[in-house]
């Protein structure tokens, strides 16, 4: 019997099922020491930090029913993990791999440090369907176009089936010096988030089951309408690992659906593919959140507009669909996908504000903030990235509103000042015969003028041969 503990270092994988690191540690027969190391937060808690802490608390409830818990530490993981391993005499350390630049550097450094110390370090694939370096074109280069990437990924074969939860878990029961018991204090702004989320592995699985049963068949047709509950709602769970992409892939692929809904299933799986593509791009371009992939955009004359940026953040632009989305983000920590595109396009093209400032705001406020998807999607909207929308395609927020929220249901849900405005006028309330409702602003920029300004800026960068 091996009494030296096996450490399982949990980062974004708070689940028992399909947790490769946990399964491998269990198979050693050693008692398990589950740990989580809170990173230092010099700028305070973000929405995804909040969601991770809530997830951790619920995961601990599940573990206590099995006789165990997660031991929580705070500080620099590169320093703390070796100290903890030495303190408890760990035989081995297990973790699921990370692919962000900082995580990669830390994990690689830890493996080098553990190698001469007699403590084995084992890492596993657990957060993606495909490791980022495995899907390449015929000459071994990374893909720049999503359709080609996804075709190659699908041709590589289906992901392995998800692992079952370990049948028995034996926990390390001795006290662990330095572990924290107290809960982090919640900032006041998190008080509105709780009503919009459920937590835990069971909640994630329940959401997946309900999505397959109720919405998968209509996904392709209804996913763009923010007034409908037609998307999966799984992104926060995927972000902190309450569910794995393999679990989602297999459940959706194996579900019995009407043959007429095959396209809807394929569309949803392709959205998982876009997440994979984002991570492959970040793997090749660690500066994805800081530098435009298309170099010509580094010369675009972005405007410095603090009041416009603040109006956008607070949902006070005067464009109802944009404002509804930004208020949904602030109050719930999520935003409907279609509205994210409209809101991002508005910041970049209507206000001509650097996309990086929008990316940073979403990084602070999204409960499902994903460093790869967030950066790639902002570059997509700004026209600066891989397989991105052309810069000259400028979304009209009024037309988008009329098309995707025709009755104004979504707008009224998040912008109560407009609840009495008619369906016809709610998309451009400044044109209403009854006048603009009290406490709602006029548009901070005229759409036509903003469009001309954005195209002129891009035309200048391209030497005067831009398209309009």
Image (cartoon, rainbow, N blue to C red):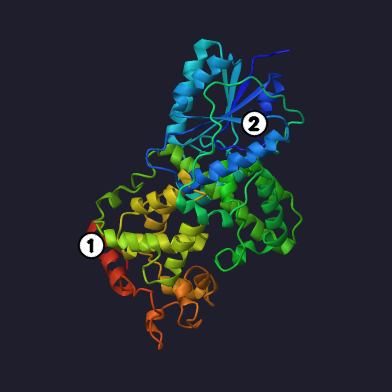
Mark 1 = which residue?
A: 464
Q: Quadrant of residue 85?
A: top right
Instruction: Categorize mark 2 by other alpha carbons within 10 Å: few (<14), some (14-19), many (20+).
Output: many
Left-right relation of 160 to 356: right
Q: How many marks?
A: 2
Q: Foreground: 269 or 365?
A: 365
Q: CA distance from mark 2 to mark 1?
A: 62 Å
Q: Quadrant of residue 315?
A: bottom left
Disc 2 or 1, which lies upstream in sequence?
2
Q: Residue at 59% of width from left, 16% of height from top? A: 90
Where on the picture, by quarter, is residue 9?
Answer: top right
Tell me, yes or no, if residue 387 can be seen here: no
User: Which mark is drawn over residue 43?
Assistant: none
Towards the viewer: 310 or 448: 310
What is the quadrant of the N terminus in the image?
Answer: top right
Give the label, 2 or 1, closer to the camera.
2
Q: What secondary structure is found at the residue carrying circle 2?
A: loop
Please tell me whether residue 344 is drawn above or below residue 40 in the rendered image.
Answer: below
Helix, strand or loop for disc 1: loop
Q: Residues within 10 Å of mark 1 (few under 14, many from 20)?
A: few
Q: Residue at x 68, y 57 (%)?
A: 211
Point out residue 409 in the picture as x, y percentages from the top left corner: 55, 73
Q: Is residue 290 visible?
A: yes
- 457 or 332: nearer the viewer: 332
The one nearer the camera, 178 or 134, is: 178
Q: Which residue is drawn at the image coordinates 60% and 51% (left, top)?
A: 234
Image coordinates for residue 87, horizontal then vertical, percent: 54, 15
Residue drawn at (46%, 60%) of the image:
340
Residue that badge 2 annotates:
69
Q: Position of residue 239 (x, y in %)?
A: 55, 44
């Amino acid at each position: 019997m091996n009494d030296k503990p096996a450490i399982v270092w949990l980062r974004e994988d708070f689940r028992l099922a399909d947790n490769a690191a946990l399964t491998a540690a269990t198979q050693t027969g050693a008692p398990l020491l589950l740990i989580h190391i809170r990173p230092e937060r010099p700028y305070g808690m973000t929405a995804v930090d909040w969601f991770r802490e809530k997830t951790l608390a619920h995961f601990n409830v599940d573990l206590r029913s099995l006789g165990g818990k997660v031991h929580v530490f705070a500080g620099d993981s590169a320093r703390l993990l070796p100290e903890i391993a030495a303190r408890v005499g760990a035989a081995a350390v297990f973790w699921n791999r990370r692919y962000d630049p900082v995580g990669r550097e830390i994990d690689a450094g830890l493996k080098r440090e553990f190698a001469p110390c007699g403590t084995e370090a084992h890492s596993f694939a657990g957060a993606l369907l495909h490791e980022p370096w495995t899907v390449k074109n015929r000459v071994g280069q990374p893909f720049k176009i999503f359709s080609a990437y996804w075709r190659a990924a699908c041709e590589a074969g289906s992901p392995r089936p998800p692992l079952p939860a370990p049948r028995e878990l034996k926990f390390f029961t001795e006290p662990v010096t330095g572990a924290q018991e107290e809960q982090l204090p919640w900032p006041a702004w998190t008080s509105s988030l709780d009503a919009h989320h459920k937590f835990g592995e069971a909640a994630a699985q329940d959401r997946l089951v309900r999505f397959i049963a109720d919405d998968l068949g209509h996904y392709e047709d209804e996913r763009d309408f923010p007034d409908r509950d037609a998307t999966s709602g799984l992104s926060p769970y995927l972000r902190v690992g309450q569910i794995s992409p393999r679990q989602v892939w297999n459940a959706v692929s194996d579900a019995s659906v009407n043959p007429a809904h095959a396209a809807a299933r394929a569309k949803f799986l392709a959205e998982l593919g876009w997440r994979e593509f984002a991570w492959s791009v970040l793997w090749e371009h660690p500066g994805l959140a800081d530098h435009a992939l298309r170099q010509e955009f580094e010369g675009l004359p972005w405007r410095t507009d603090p009041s416009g940026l603040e109006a956008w953040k607070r949902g006070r632009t005067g464009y109802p669909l944009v404002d509804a989305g930004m208020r949904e983000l602030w109050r719930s920590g999520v935003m409907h996908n279609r509205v994210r595109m409209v809101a991002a396009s508005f910041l970049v093209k209507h206000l001509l504000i650097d996309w990086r400032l929008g990316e940073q705001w979403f990084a602070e406020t999204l409960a499902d903030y994903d460093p790869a998807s967030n950066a790639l999607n902002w570059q997509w909207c700004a026209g600066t990235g891989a397989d991105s929308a052309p810069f000259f395609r400028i979304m009209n927020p009024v037309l988008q509103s009329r098309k995707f929220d025709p009755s104004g249901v979504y707008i009224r849900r998040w912008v109560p000042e407009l609840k009495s405005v008619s369906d016809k006028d709610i998309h451009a309330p400044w044109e209403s015969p009854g006048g603009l409702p009290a406490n709602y602003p006029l548009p901070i920029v005229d759409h036509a003028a903003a469009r001309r300004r954005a195209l002129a800026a891009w035309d200048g960068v391209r030497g005067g041969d831009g398209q309009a």
